[in-house]
Image (cartoon, rainbow, N blue to C red):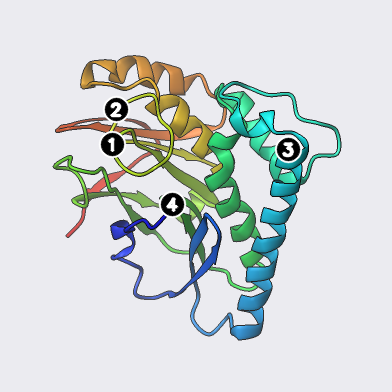
Amino acid sequence: MNVDRIYRKNLSADLETFEVKIKETDLLISVEPNRIGPEIREKIQQYTYGLRQELETYLAEDPDFQITLSPYLIYTGAPVIAQKMAKYANIAGVGPMAAVAGGFAEMVGEYVGQFSPEVIVENGGDIYLKSRKPRIVGIFAGMSPFSNRIGLKLFPRQMPLGVCTSSGTVGPSLSFGKADAAIILAKSAFLADAAATAVGNRVNSPEDFDLALACAKKIDGIHGIVIIKDDKMAAWGAVEVVPIK
């Protein structure tokens, strides 16, 4: 599926950026300049390929893992990525595939961190960050008037950090809600991704914000939440919302 990732247009000018694409996995990786040459990029490509192979092999052995929408008991001997997907999805109360995009961002980000002190990995709008300086992550919320006009200011003390988004109006990912954006900040991108799905599922209109926030606050490990629907927004926790040009 070809997706116009217009949220990738505004990138940090102080970082060097490259892509890793393997089937549905489409990573945009930003690192400190002159740290990662062709050989290391190939290692990152192969590492990502290996993660996909491990997960695909497991899905063939345990097909219910891919289709369940509820917390799931994983098979003994499952690969690490599948174990973490199940662990954090269980915490959020959703199926393990809800954590797949954030999971790839985190595991590839940790691998890239061997080679660069500055790492940002974005995978379908789900982000893993580790930086020594404040960063602003822009918010894309479809047709909402907030879209591309505000961002989240993040600080080194919060990192490494997962910033993940679920939307019922943007993109191909499954959501049972109609939020333009349900954004979660958590130490784990696995958890942020799964929790964003759980929160987004509960929002069909701004009247649902209070219930969705109450749900999110019960998920251990979440640091911040932003929910956007049309021209309304709610936020909670360690989030600093800033205007962007």
What's the residue type where badge 4 is placed? Gly
Indicate left or right for 30 with 236 as reference: right
Please, is residue 51 above or below residue 83 in the view? below
Indicate left or right for 192 with 242 as reference: right
Q: Are dots 2 and 1 in contact, CB under 8 Å? A: yes
- Residue 14 shows in the view: yes
Which label number is shown at residue 124?
Answer: 4
What's the residue type where badge 2 is placed? Lys
Task: Tell me if mark 4 has few (under 14), some (14-19) or many (20+) residues whose alpha carbon lies within 10 angstroms of its own.
Answer: many
Q: Which residue is disc 1 drawn over?
A: 169
* Quadrant assignment, res 231: top left
- Across and down, in percent, residue 14 comes to 39, 76
Question: Which label's residue is closer to the chain start, 2 or 4?
Answer: 4
Spatial CA distance of label 4 from label 1 is 14 Å
Spatial CA distance of label 3 from label 4 is 21 Å
What's the residue type where badge 1 is placed? Thr
Spatial CA distance of label 2 from label 1 is 6 Å
Task: Tell me if mark 1 has few (under 14), some (14-19) or many (20+) residues whose alpha carbon lies within 10 angstroms of its own.
Answer: some
Indicate left or right for 86 with 61 as reference: left
Question: Which label's residue is closer to the chain start, 3 or 4?
Answer: 3
Spatial CA distance of label 1 from label 3 is 29 Å
Q: Are dots 2 and 4 in contact, CB under 8 Å? A: no
At a point 53% along the width and 33% down the height, the residue shown is 194
Question: Which label's residue is closer to the chain start, 2 or 1?
Answer: 1
Q: Which residue is disc 2 drawn over?
A: 178
- Residue closest to the eye, 217 or 103: 103
- Residue 191 shows in the view: no
Camera-side mark, 2 or 3: 2
Q: Which residue is disc 3 drawn over?
A: 83
Task: Tell me if mark 3 has few (under 14), some (14-19) or many (20+) residues whose alpha carbon lies within 10 angstroms of its own.
Answer: some
